[in-house]
Image: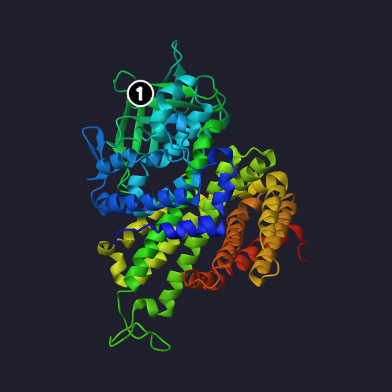
């Protein structure tokens, strides 16, 4: 079965759980935004994804991208689907109207890209960096570059890449060797090689705008010596730039996306931002990409769940324990969905999907608050939310996408291991999300070391208090969440104290700390979900599964971190 978006679920979380419309309407940029407009956009987006994007997913995986005579050819149907994507105005949802965009809230783009990733992860990789490239050029590009490239990228007419990684420099960008030499006309000549470049070449758009991390002559060593240069595939006037795809990587998954080895041979480019300040410009793009990767994780897990749930309601095997289910009728065996072990798998993944959506959608709303709110304190709080929450959901949602998709494959038994049902593709495609845009280990270190401990835990404490104050202590569920938020605040203080005695400790426990944070956020999300839908059968089973099968990990991870801190702070036994 192909993926089917469910606009009603997204709308429920946005409206009933997050009250997103009133918050967005309070911003001058979205004064005319309302639930009717939001519902219309989601409904049309769902139709487009289901009817145009999802049906070509299997060809994308089985045929894949090919390098023919030095140029990349995408799978059948991809070019037409992308053209329909552009013609429908979908790449331009949140771009400014002055740049050819529609000026809509970021959360609509977030929902759209979640669905796109679920329906066809390979094709979605091509436009996945458009928003980040747009923001990067908009904030750091010269007026000339903005005039030449911004509207083309905003509308999706031209696609973009992020060229960071080199064969010897993966996560360690300080080792980048690609060079950029200034020319008399103000341009630069870029030379070097990049690997793992998603969409490095393809036939989806007439031009590709490469944002290349490189070094100027006499630049300082390490990350402080990196600059960012815009290098187009096609120059003004139509001549081909000295940029070439040397090879397409043969990957475990994502066959519909061309992951290219790129060569720049004195290619012409233009500086974005200040010399030796390339990382500052690039991080605008990377942070946008990390939120999108979190949404990829949610979408891929939903795709896996949809396949497993549909199969479990068709396949009959043995008798389920307990009273005869209503679905049995005269059948000799019960539906797989009636078996408790399978029910646990399905409900647990649903708990992750819906809880994570609430957190991710709130993050997208906060992005717009940080950009557009007239109150400086509100902007500061929103920026704090985005800085702290983005690494959490990037790591946790992508890890659950892979492990949860594997669990969903288990629902099929042996049928899941063959291509016919499509679930094995989701497992393969989802694995890379734990690696790119900063590995999950780097996300955990970024969270704990660079963001939480950098201010002694004050920012995280403020965020947790904000969540606490949104709950009602008179409700047992809310009171339990408040207790966990308090435990997390205390744990943060404990790590900060222990880190003074052993600087390695935060790096050792960063993964566990991130999981504690995510589980606390999920507990908050499910308290809000249940409050918004009391007695609603749609949410009852995943809510129960969350408390029974997911939340107990909170105590386990909390205990791991506590014991690690005690090993540092308590005197050794005599």
The residue labelled by disc 1 is: 265
Which picture quadrant has residue 403?
bottom left
Quarter of the rendering occupied by the C terminus? bottom right
Which picture quadrant has residue 485?
bottom right
**x and y percentages locating residue 201 in the rendered image:** 31, 35
**x and y percentages locating residue 443 in the rendered image:** 55, 48
Report whether residue 443 is seen.
Answer: no
At 34% from the left edge and 73% from the top edge, which residue is drawn? 312
State left or right for residue 84 relative to residue 362: left
Say which of 298 and 537 sits in front: 537
At 29% from the left edge and 62% from the top edge, which residue is drawn? 1
**Total marks drawn?**
1
Q: Is residue 330 above or below residue 91?
A: below
Q: Is residue 236 above or below residue 379?
A: above
State left or right for residue 489 relative to residue 165: right
Q: Secondary structure at mark 1?
A: strand
At 46% from the left edge and 33% from the top edge, which residue is drawn? 97
- Label 1 Cα neighbours within 10 Å, binned few <14 / some 14-19 / many ≥20: some
**x and y percentages locating residue 523 in the rendered image:** 59, 64
**x and y percentages locating residue 475 in the rendered image:** 67, 70
Say which of 466 and 188 sits in front: 466
Farthest top residue in view:
184
Which picture quadrant has residue 327?
bottom left
Instruction: Specify how the rendered protein is coloured.
Output: rainbow
Say which of 179 and 292 sits in front: 292
At 29% from the left edge and 42% from the top edge, which residue is drawn? 84
Report whether residue 129 is seen.
Answer: yes
State left or right for residue 372 relative to residue 73: right
């Amino acid at each position: 079965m192909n993926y089917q978006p469910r606009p009603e679920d997204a709308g429920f979380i946005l409206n009933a759980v997050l009250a997103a419309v009133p918050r967005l309407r309070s911003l001058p940029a979205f004064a005319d935004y309302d639930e009717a407009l939001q519902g219309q956009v989601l409904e049309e987006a769902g139709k487009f994804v289901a009817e145009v994007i999802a049906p070509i997913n299997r060809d994308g995986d089985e045929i894949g991208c090919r390098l023919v005579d030095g140029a990349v050819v995408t799978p059948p149907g991809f070019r037409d689907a992308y053209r329909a994507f552009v013609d429908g105005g979908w790449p331009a949802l949140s771009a400014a109207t002055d740049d050819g965009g529609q000026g809509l809230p970021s959360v609509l783009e977030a929902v759209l890209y979640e669905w796109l990733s679920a329906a066809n992860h390979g094709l979605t990789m091509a436009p996945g960096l458009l928003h980040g490239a747009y923001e990067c050029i908009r904030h750091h590009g010269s007026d000339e570059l903005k005039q030449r490239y911004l509207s083309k990228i905003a509308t999706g007419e031209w696609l973009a890449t992020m060229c960071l990684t080199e064969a010897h420099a993966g996560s360690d960008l300080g080792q980048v060797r690609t060079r950029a030499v200034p020319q008399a006309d103000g341009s630069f000549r870029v030379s070097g090689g990049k690997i793992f470049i998603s969409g490095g070449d393809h036939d989806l758009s007439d031009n590709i705008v490469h944002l290349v991390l490189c070094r100027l002559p006499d630049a300082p060593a390490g990350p402080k010596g990196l600059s960012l240069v815009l290098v187009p595939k096609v120059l003004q006037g139509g001549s081909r730039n000295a940029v070439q795809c040397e090879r397409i990587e043969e990957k475990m998954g994502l066959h519909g996306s061309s992951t290219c080895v790129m060569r720049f041979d004195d290619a012409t480019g233009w500086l974005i931002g200040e010399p030796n300040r390339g990382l500052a410009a690039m991080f605008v793009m990377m942070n946008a990409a990390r939120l999108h990767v979190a949404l990829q994780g949610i979408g891929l897990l939903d795709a896996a769940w949809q396949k497993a749930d549909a199969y479990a309601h068709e396949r009959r095997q043995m008798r389920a324990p307990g009273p005869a289910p209503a679905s049995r009728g005269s059948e000799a065996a019960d539906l797989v969905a009636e078996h408790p072990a399978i029910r646990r798998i399905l409900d647990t993944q649903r708990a992750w999907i819906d809880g994570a959506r609430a957190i991710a959608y709130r993050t997208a709303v906060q992005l717009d608050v940080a950009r557009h709110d007239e109150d400086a304190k509100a902007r500061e709080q929103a920026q704090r939310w985005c800085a702290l929450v983005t690494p959490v959901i990037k790591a946790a949602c992508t890890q659950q996408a892979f492990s949860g998709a594997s669990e969903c494959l288990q629902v099929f038994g042996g049928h899941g291991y063959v291509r016919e049902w499509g679930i094995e593709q989701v497992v393969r495609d989802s694995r890379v999300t734990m690696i790119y845009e900063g590995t999950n280990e780097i996300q955990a270190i970024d969270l704990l070391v660079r963001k939480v401990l950098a201010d002694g835990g004050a920012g995280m404490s403020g965020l947790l208090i904000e969540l606490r104050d949104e709950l009602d202590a008179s409700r047992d569920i809310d009171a339990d969440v408040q207790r966990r938020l308090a435990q997390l605040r205390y744990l943060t203080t404990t790590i900060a104290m222990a880190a003074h005695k052993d600087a390695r400790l935060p790096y050792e426990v960063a993964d566990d700390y991130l999981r504690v944070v995510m589980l606390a956020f999920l507990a908050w999300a499910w308290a809000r979900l249940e409050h918004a839908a009391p007695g609603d059968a749609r949410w009852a089973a995943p809510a129960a599964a969350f408390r029974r099968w997911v939340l107990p990990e909170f105590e386990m991870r909390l205990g791991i971190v506590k014991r690690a801190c005690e090993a540092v702070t308590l005197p050794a036994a005599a």
